[in-house]
Image: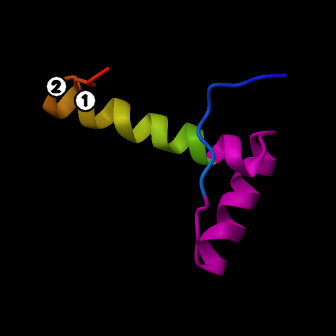
């Protein structure tokens, strides 16, 4: 299965990792998908407050 998602390393302190793991389990998501969801929520909030972020292709 191919994907257009970028792969990168993310380092988290142990407490934050464990908390995200618990949240992900409650939401029936993988840790990676939970982090992606949180990032998407933050971007949506940011764009509502500051306008759409324009990407250069």
Quadrant of res 56? top left
Q: Quadrant of the C terminus?
A: top left
Q: Which residue is mark 1?
A: 47
Q: Residue at x 61, y 61 (%)?
A: 9
Q: Residue at x 22, y 23 (%)?
A: 54
Q: Residue furthest front?
A: 57
Distance of label 1 from label 2 (alpha carbons) = 5 Å
Q: Residue furthest right?
A: 1
41 relative to 25, above or below: above
Residue 44 position in % (x across, y down): 36, 30
Q: Magenta part of the protein: which range? A: 9-34
Residue 21 position in % (x across, y down): 74, 59
Task: Give whichever of 49, 35 is nearer the camera.
Answer: 35
Q: Residues within 10 Å of mark 1 (few under 14, many from 20)?
A: few
Position of residue 23 in the picture relative to residue 51 (left or right): right
Disc 1 is placed on an element classified as: helix
Identify the disc placed on residue 51: 2
8 relative to 43, above or below: below
Position of residue 33 in the picture relative to residue 41 (left or right): right
Disc 2 is placed on an element classified as: loop
Quadrant of res 49? top left
Q: Residues within 10 Å of mark 2 (few under 14, many from 20)?
A: few
Q: Mark 1–mark 2 contact, CB under 8 Å?
A: yes
Residue 4 position in % (x across, y down): 62, 25
Task: Give whichever of 32, 22 is nearer the camera.
Answer: 32
């Amino acid at each position: 299965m191919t994907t257009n998602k970028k792969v990168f390393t993310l380092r988290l302190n142990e407490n934050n990792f464990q908390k995200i793991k618990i949240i992900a389990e409650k939401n029936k998501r993988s840790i990676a998908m939970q982090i992606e969801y949180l990032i998407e929520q933050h971007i949506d909030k940011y764009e509502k407050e500051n306008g759409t972020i324009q990407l250069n292709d």
